[in-house]
């Protein structure tokens, strides 16, 4: 007898890390994925076709390009040409006159999953913003998540976010209290604001070669018999505390990319490193790095400078560049440890992600960043190089998502 498959809607789906983990279990069907940035939408649609057997038309229908802040329109649909023009939705595959309700139809939604953009909760972001991001609209995107939950009344939801959520106070009110109040008002049980720190997990404990602390807020509808403590206990059972994957596990099998004796001009671009010799491994090309950068990278790794004092790092940066800074500017990966947290800032530069081989003298490639996030090597990221790094840095590591999904379907199998 075939085992039941559970249904889900993925909000703030990004390039699909969370969805990928759920789909890999073989126990979940995706009804819809909602994302606002086109490269992420294109990437996820492409993955559904290439890997998960969706038709091109179905992938366009299921992966909805839409601003979730227009929550009522997202849920119920919108009809007029004026609305389409207002939201910049001009292409037929981007217009959802039926809304999420029309797309889902009579199907029961078992779960809603997702992680609202986290930059407004990040401790570093608050430290570098003059008003500590008090006025950042992203502080309140959980309200849109909450509205979709209220519209579809799933049995449970999974809300993933950065650890900084636990200390963020937009408008002077702790965001964890805002979140608690919002979900309890629509009839869902979640951990209290005081209990929420116990929902902090490190992806490194779930077969991810990266330290990545994340809050996993689970919610259950009040009229179900689903026990919140037992749900978290099910996730705890999926931890792998005996083995932590390392950078070597993630990147050790990828072809090295050494610097060229002389850079090569290729059209508008300059190439400073060898081309990837293995065409089966895609999106594994080094960024262009000048002689000063390469020398810094080599020196940094050879002298294990991750472990010098913060002030020494600041002094080093000034000595090498002549520029002043208050923050660490360089960091290398270390072969036999998990990586530090992969972040969207990779879209700007890779100075905090220097390859651990001093002879390669470069930052990590798109494929290497994806491997640290446990995306399969056949996962293709569409859009510009900058967008590729951004979407990977903002994603949920696939193995972490898969562990959560596995815990949830085992739990649901036992209770339903």
Image (spheres, rainbow, N blue to C red):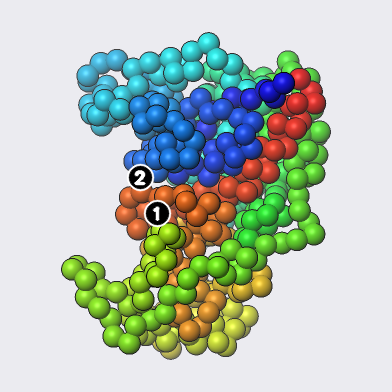
| Quarter the C terminus occupies | top right
Q: Which residue is mark 1?
A: 388
Quadrant of res 192: top right
Q: Can see residue 184?
A: no
Residue positioned 44% across, 30% down in the render: 54
The reply to whether the C-beta atoms of the residues labelled 1 and 2 are less than 8 Å apart is yes
Residue placed furthest toward the left? 267
Q: What is the tally of numbered marks visible in this picture? A: 2
Closer-to-camera residue (221/59): 59
Q: Where is residue 67 drawn, in percent x and y?
A: 38, 32
Residue positioned 32% across, 78% down in the render: 272
189 w.r.t. 128: above or below: above
Q: Where is residue 381 drawn, in percent x and y?
A: 40, 50
366 w.r.t. 25: above or below: below
132 w.r.t. 110: above or below: below
Quadrant of res 363: bottom left
Q: Which residue is mark 2?
A: 39
**How many residues crowd around disc 2 within 10 Å: few (fewer than 14), some, or many (20 or more)?**
some
The disc at residue 23 is none
Q: Where is residue 245 drawn, in percent x and y?
A: 67, 62
Closer-to-camera residue (54/315): 54
Q: Where is residue 73 drawn, in percent x and y?
A: 39, 20
| Quarter the N terminus occupies | top right
Q: Can see residue 314?
A: yes
Closer-to-camera residue (242/345): 242
Give the mark, 1 or 2, whose residue is nearer the N terminus.
Answer: 2
User: Marks 1/2: CA distance?
Assistant: 8 Å
Quadrant of res 325: bottom left
Residue positioned 22% across, 20% down in the render: 82
SS class, disc 1: helix
């Amino acid at each position: 007898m075939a085992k039941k498959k559970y249904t889900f809607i993925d909000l703030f789906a990004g390039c699909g890390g969370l969805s990928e983990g759920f789909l890999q279990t073989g126990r979940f069907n995706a009804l819809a994925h909602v994302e606002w940035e086109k490269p992420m939408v294109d990437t996820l649609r492409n993955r559904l076709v290439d890997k998960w057997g969706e038709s091109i038309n179905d992938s366009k229908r299921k992966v909805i390009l839409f601003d979730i802040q227009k929550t009522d329109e997202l849920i119920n649909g919108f009809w007029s040409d004026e609305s389409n023009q207002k939201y910049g939705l001009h292409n037929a595959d981007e217009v959802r006159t039926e809304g999420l309700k029309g797309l889902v139809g009579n199907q029961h939604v078992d779960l809603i999953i997702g992680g609202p953009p986290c930059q407004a909760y990040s401790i570093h972001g608050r430290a570098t913003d003059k008003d500590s991001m008090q006025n950042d609209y992203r502080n309140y995107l959980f309200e849109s998540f909450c509205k979709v939950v209220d519209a579809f009344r799933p049995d449970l939801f999974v809300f993933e976010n950065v650890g900084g959520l636990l200390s963020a106070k937009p408008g002077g009110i702790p965001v964890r209290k805002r979140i608690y109040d919002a979900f309890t008002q629509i009839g869902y049980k979640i951990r209290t604001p005081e209990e929420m720190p116990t929902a902090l997990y490190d992806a490194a404990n779930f077969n991810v070669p990266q330290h990545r602390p994340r809050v996993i807020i689970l919610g259950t509808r009040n009229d179900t018999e689903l026990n919140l403590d037992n749900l978290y206990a099910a996730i705890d059972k999926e931890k792998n505390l005996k083995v932590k994957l390392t950078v070597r596990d993630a990147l050790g099998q990828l072809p090295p990319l050494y610097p060229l004796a002389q850079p090569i001009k290729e059209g508008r671009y300059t190439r400073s490193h060898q081309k990837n010799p293995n065409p089966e491994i895609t999106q594994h090309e080094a960024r262009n790095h000048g002689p000063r950068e390469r020398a810094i990278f080599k020196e940094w790794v050879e002298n294990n400078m991750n472990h010098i004092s913060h002030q020494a790092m600041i002094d080093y940066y000034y000595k090498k560049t002549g520029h002043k800074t208050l923050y660490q500017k360089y960091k290398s990966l270390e072969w036999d440890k998990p990586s530090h947290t992969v972040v969207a800032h990779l879209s700007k530069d890779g100075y905090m992600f220097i390859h651990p081989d001093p002879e390669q003298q470069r930052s990590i490639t798109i494929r290497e960043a994806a491997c640290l996030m446990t995306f399969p090597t056949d996962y293709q990221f569409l859009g510009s190089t900058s967008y590729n790094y951004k979407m990977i840095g903002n994603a949920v590591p696939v193995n972490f998502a898969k562990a959560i999904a596995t815990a949830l379907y085992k739990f649901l199998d036992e209770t339903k």
